[in-house]
Image: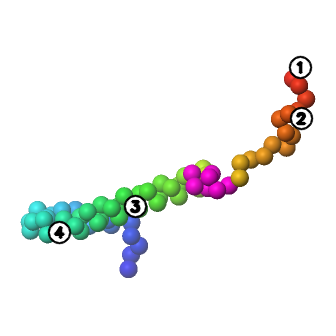
Amino acid sequence: MQPVSAQRIENAIRIVARLIELSGDVYWPILERLEAEHAALADREERLARYLAGERPQAARRLLPKPTRSIPREDRAPHV
């Protein structure tokens, strides 16, 4: 079995679109499922690329503690 790729999903979408054209709307739920799978795959690939590029996901930002400063603001020497 080949891994699912965007290209394979796009090919399947074209095939199902042709079936809909020839046979009617009975295949429409399959087309919708393929479109959802294509969008989910694109979303996963985009998120993975962002994470690998060093961006922190929003959920992790909420869960991780805020960075602490080494010197509290009120203890810093005044600027001259």
Task: Please tell me whether mark 1 or mark 4 is closer to you in this view.
Answer: 1
Q: CA distance from mark 2 to mark 1?
A: 15 Å
Q: Is residue 74 above or below residue 46?
A: above
Task: Please tell me whether mark 1 or mark 3 is closer to you in this view.
Answer: 1
Which of the two residues, 48 or 15, is positioned nearer the viewer here? Answer: 48
Q: CA distance from mark 4 to mark 3?
A: 20 Å
Query: Mark 4, residues whose alpha carbon is within 10 Å: few (<14), some, or many (≥20)?
Result: some
User: Which of the 4 image quarters holds residue 42?
Assistant: bottom left
Residue furthest toward the front?
74
List x then y, in percent, for residue 67.
Answer: 74, 47
- Residue at which label 2 appears: 75
- Residue at which label 1 appears: 80
Q: Are marks 4 and 2 in contact (CB under 8 Å)?
A: no
Which of the two residues, 79 or 55, is positioned nearer the viewer here? Answer: 79
User: Left of 54 or right of it: where is 49?
Assistant: left
Which callout, 3 or 2, points at the residue further toward the start of the chain?
3
Q: CA distance from mark 1 to mark 4?
A: 74 Å
Q: Residue at x 22, y 62 (%)?
A: 14
User: Which of the 4 image quarters holds residue 5?
Assistant: bottom left
Dot 1: what SS? loop
Q: Are marks 4 and 3 in contact (CB under 8 Å)?
A: no
- Residue at which label 4 appears: 27
Q: Residue at x 9, y 68 (%)?
A: 23
Q: Residue at x 13, y 65 (%)?
A: 25
- Residue type at the position of mark 1: Val
- Residue at which label 3 appears: 40
Which callout, 1 or 4, points at the residue further toward the start of the chain?
4
Is 73 contained in the magenta span?
no
User: Left of 46 or right of it: where is 25?
Assistant: left
Q: CA distance from mark 3 to mark 2?
A: 50 Å
Magenta region: 58-64
